[in-house]
Amino acid sequence: MQYTYPYYRQPFTPNQVESNRRTMEVYGDGKVSVEPNVVTIQLAVVTENQSLQTAQEENAMRMNQVIQALNNEGVPKEVIQTAAYTISPKYEYEDGKQMDRGYQVTNAVQIRVKDISKIGKIIDTAVDQGVNRVSNITFTIDQPQVYYEEALRFALENGGQKAQTIADSLQLQLDPVPVKIIEQTEAPPVAYKTFAASAESFATPIEPGQIEIEASVELQYQY
């Protein structure tokens, strides 16, 4: 006698169900515009003289005047830091011969100011007291991580919207929770402005503009 046994289909295990699903990868971008509230600037005194000692003494006298004037403008000594101090011999060539023209002494300090509205006055005061080189004006913000996290949330929302749009267009049943998230990290943004300084008295306009903080993510969804 021949018996026929019914066929029983083995149920899917979670791993098998997972492997039978397809995936979709999208990228999300987020951006936050912030007004900077911190500015750093480099101020330098450059002196030249045939005598190295004289060039150094003149440079030290002028830089001391600059620092004292900055203190009087409300810039504390704690935010004034020496950025560079260099001594360079100067040469010229006449009829193919090298001529000694003395020395150049450069003393540069970097200051960090949280009240951006004062930076124009600070520059004018420093130039009036002997600074003859202004450079590396950099605008940043306090606690940039707070704004980056906001941009990161926007990036996640942007990526999710893209994935849902694709799913709706193709009539796919999308799992709204991504199975993979990769953060695309970048260096924190800063804004730079540079210009040449003169010894003339003038009102220096400083416009910090805005800093754009961006975040990007790669998202993988299942459907």
Image: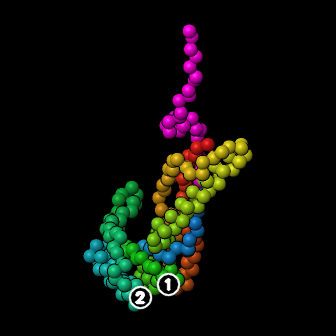
* Residue stretch rendered in magenta on the structure: 1-28
- The percent position of residue 90, horizontal first and vertical second, equals 35, 65
Q: Residue at x 56, y 19 (%)?
A: 5
Q: How is the image coloured?
A: rainbow
Indicate yes or no whether the magenta region holds residue 10: yes
Residue 94: give x, y in percent of width and height: 40, 60
Relative horizontal placement of residue 205, taking residue 68 as reference (left or right): right
Q: Position of residue 10 (x, y in %)?
A: 53, 29
- Quarter residue 156 falls in: bottom right
- Local secondary structure at mark 1: helix
Residue on which disc 2 sits: 74
Please, what is the three-letter code of the amino acid marked with disc 2? Answer: Gly
Q: Where, quadrant-wise, is the N terminus in this rendering?
A: top right
Q: Is residue 125 above or below residue 107?
A: below
- Let me know if residue 53 is in the magenta part: no
Q: Amino acid at mark 1?
A: Lys
Q: Which residue is mark 1?
A: 118
* Mark pair 1, 2: CA separation: 9 Å
- Label 2: which secondary element: loop
Q: Is residue 205 left or right of residue 38?
A: right
- Which residue is situated farthest in the left direction here? 53
Q: Is residue 52 visible?
A: yes
The furthest residue to the top: 1
Crowd tier of the residue under label 1, counting other residues whose Cα lies within 10 Å: few below 14, some 14–19, many 20 or above: some
In the image, residue 176 sits, relative to residue 117, either above or below, namely above
128, 76: nearer the viewer: 76
Residue drawn at the location 53% of the way across and 34% of the way down:
12
Q: Identify the residue at the far bottom of this view.
A: 72
5 vs 68, left or right, is right
Q: Quadrant of residue 8?
A: top right
